[in-house]
Image: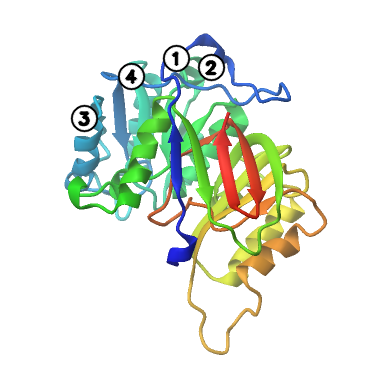
Amino acid sequence: MNRKHFLSFLITAGTAAFNSEAFAGSKNEAGRHSSRIPPYLMEGDTIGITSPASFISMAEIQPAVAQLQHWGFKVEIGKTIGSRDFTRGGTDGERAADLQQMLDRQEIKAILCARGGYGLVRIIDQLNFRHFKKHPKWLIGFSDITLLHTHINSKYKIASIHSKMCNSFPNVWEEALPIQIETILSIRQVLTGQAVRYTAAYNEHNREGRAEGILVGGNLSLIETATGSSSELHTANKILFIEDTNEPLYSLDRMLWNLKRSGKLDKLKGLIIGGFKLKPEEPGEEFGISLHEIVLEKVKEYDYPVCFDFPVGHQINNFALKCGAAHILNIDQNGSTLTSI
């Protein structure tokens, strides 16, 4: 990303301790309830690592394991780590069983998905969330893991964390770029209940305004995949964020038409456009409409605020966002700010 669009990250310390009010669901100023907030983590709590989508080796997760332990957490590594069934982290049955046992076991306080890729849609309907509904815990990841976010946020109204995964932790912490360190630290900050405030530089295509609502979203391709299924994302009166990678402009146009035609854009409080790494166009095959134009075309009859180049997506500046929790989005001439409340 161009340096002039570098996005700053500010953290305001908050209370990490779990309380019954947070578990029942946080309130925004209008009195509406967000999703149920799982207990925030404390030192000594256990985080499980599993791979419900693509394959990842034991060696590849070691930087994440070391960092989680450095933060004071215990780590339990699932059987899918190092297991392989072609491109996937084990067979469908193995991946479902590994995630299921972590959902069911009360001593595991959070589940960090090792990587995205592809495979969660093949097992989502095999999972039983009965115990998880009684004893919610943090589910963490992005990309293909978006389907897990949409599923539990829409069906069970339980908050989750959209963030980097094990394959994004730096091999040598001391040699990592500051922005990489900040994004990884944001996972701990959200997990432990600290309030967060993210800012993005001004973009000339932004539509200014202020919005307050529950934050939902994730990977655009997976949001489209979930449409019409039991995992469908509900967006009415919410702040929606989207991102994607390696998609041609015509594909993004088609997916955004899907969101519009299915009513997902018409009752939003606000729209956040994160990172979109575009697939290069072949000479003579240009789509002729930019990403900004594609988005603004779909929301031209609505008046909610819209911001571009937000620090979320398949990029180094991919900060942890608490899906299902109340946030305030403010967009003005100084840029965009998203604050958890």
Say what secondary structure mark 1 lies in.
Answer: loop
Q: Quadrant for the C terminus, please.
A: top right
Q: Quadrant of residue 166?
A: top left
SS of the residue at dot 3? helix
Q: Position of residue 262 (x, y in %)?
A: 74, 50
Q: What colouring does the structure picture have? A: rainbow
Q: Residues within 10 Å of mark 3 (few under 14, many from 20)?
A: some
Pointer 1: what residue? Answer: 18
How far apart are the alpha carbons under marks 2 and 1?
Answer: 7 Å
Q: Which residue is mark 2?
A: 22
Q: Residue furthest top?
A: 20
Above-or-below relation of 13 to 94: above
* Residue type beneath disc 3: Gln
Q: Residue at x 63, y 42 (%)?
A: 329
N-terminal label among 2 and 3: 2
Which amino acid type is shown beneath numbered disc 1? Phe
Could you say where residue 12 lies in the image, as x and y percent from the top left? Answer: 45, 31
Q: On the image, numbered disc 4 is attached to which residue?
A: 42
Q: Name the residue that disc number 3 marks.
A: 69
Gap between marks 4 and 1 measured at Cα: 9 Å
Amino acid type at circle 2 is Ala
Secondary element at image label 4? loop
- Determine the CA span between mark 3 and mark 4: 12 Å
Q: Residues within 10 Å of mark 1 (few under 14, many from 20)?
A: some
* Mark 2–mark 1 CB contact (< 8 Å): yes
Residue 35 in sight = yes
Q: Residue at x 76, y 55 (%)?
A: 261
What amino acid is found at the position of numbered circle 4 in the picture?
A: Met
Residue 1, can we see it?
no
Query: Quick check: 169 left or right of 151?
Result: left
Of mark 4 and mark 1, the one earlier in the sequence is 1
